[in-house]
């Protein structure tokens, strides 16, 4: 059985980071039905990864932080979210009515618990709020999950 891959990452990616991550996934992810990707489908890294999984012929699982999560995304992100959500083979929703840091953390932890390897499109800095990328990476490392950080040295977020 192929390993299950999860994603955590920033919602806004500086120039070059998206291309760097997508290039890595195209080389590293196995193609075909054995590929399973787990994502919260947020703007940025999550949606990029989900698109790569589907393009490779894989199966997508969505872990949502709350009900109506799509409403918290940018207009373009919401449109992509809805398309990816329709394509997901499985959807798990955390028991929160609206977006919250606790919901984001719960979704990140559930995502890690469902994957064998975590990709992190992450600048290496602390989270800007509970449940951010750094918190999900820390949880994965505590659980002994391999983590591949995809970033370019010298690039910073705005």
Image (tube, rainbow, N blue to C red):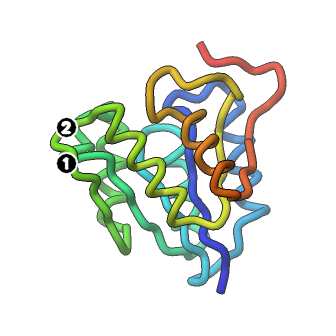
106 displayed left or right of 94: right
Residue 67 disc label? 1
Q: Look at the image and tell me in which quarter the C terminus lies.
A: top right
Q: Residues within 10 Å of mark 1 (few under 14, many from 20)?
A: some
From the viewer's perspective, is residue 34 above or below residue 157?
A: below
Marks 2/1: CA–CA distance = 6 Å
Q: Quick one: SS at disc 2?
A: loop
Res 5 → quadrant: bottom right
Q: Name the element at disc 1.
A: loop
Name which residue lies at 66% across and 23% down: 125
Q: Residue 78: where, in percent of width, then height?
A: 30, 42
Q: Are marks 2 and 1 in contact (CB under 8 Å)?
A: yes
Mark 2 or mark 1: name the one nearer the start of the chain.
Answer: 1
Most foreground residue, 8 or 51: 8
Question: Percent x, y for residue 139?
Answer: 58, 46
Task: Locate the N terminus by quadrant.
Answer: bottom right
Q: Residue at x 67, y 26 (%)?
A: 15
- Residue furthest front as drawn: 142
- Residue 63 at x, y percent in the picture: 38, 57
| Image height of 136 relative to 83, above or below | above
Q: Check the image and report above or below for 28 versus 97.
A: below
Q: In the drawing, does residue 75 fall left or right of residue 139?
A: left
Identify residue for label 2: 98
The structure residue drawn at horizontal position 39% and vertical position 47%, both measured from the top left corner, is 106
Residue in the image at 32% along x and 46% along y: 65
């Amino acid at each position: 059985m192929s390993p299950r891959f999860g994603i955590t990452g920033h919602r806004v990616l500086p120039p070059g980071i998206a291309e760097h991550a997508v290039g890595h996934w195209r080389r590293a992810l196995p193609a075909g039905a054995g590929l399973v990707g787990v994502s919260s489908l947020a703007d940025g890294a999550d949606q990029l990864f989900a698109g790569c999984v589907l393009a490779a012929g894989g199966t997508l699982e969505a872990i949502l932080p709350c009900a109506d999560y799509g409403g918290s995304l940018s207009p373009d992100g919401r449109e992509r979210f809805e398309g990816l959500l329709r394509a997901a083979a499985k959807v798990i929703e955390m028991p929160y009515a609206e977006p919250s840091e606790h919901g984001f953390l719960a979704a990140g932890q559930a995502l890690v618990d469902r994957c064998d390897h975590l990709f992190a499109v992450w600048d290496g800095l602390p989270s800007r709020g509970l449940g951010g990328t750094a918190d999900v990476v820390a949880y994965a490392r505590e659980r002994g999950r391999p983590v591949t950080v995809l970033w370019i040295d010298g690039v910073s977020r705005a």
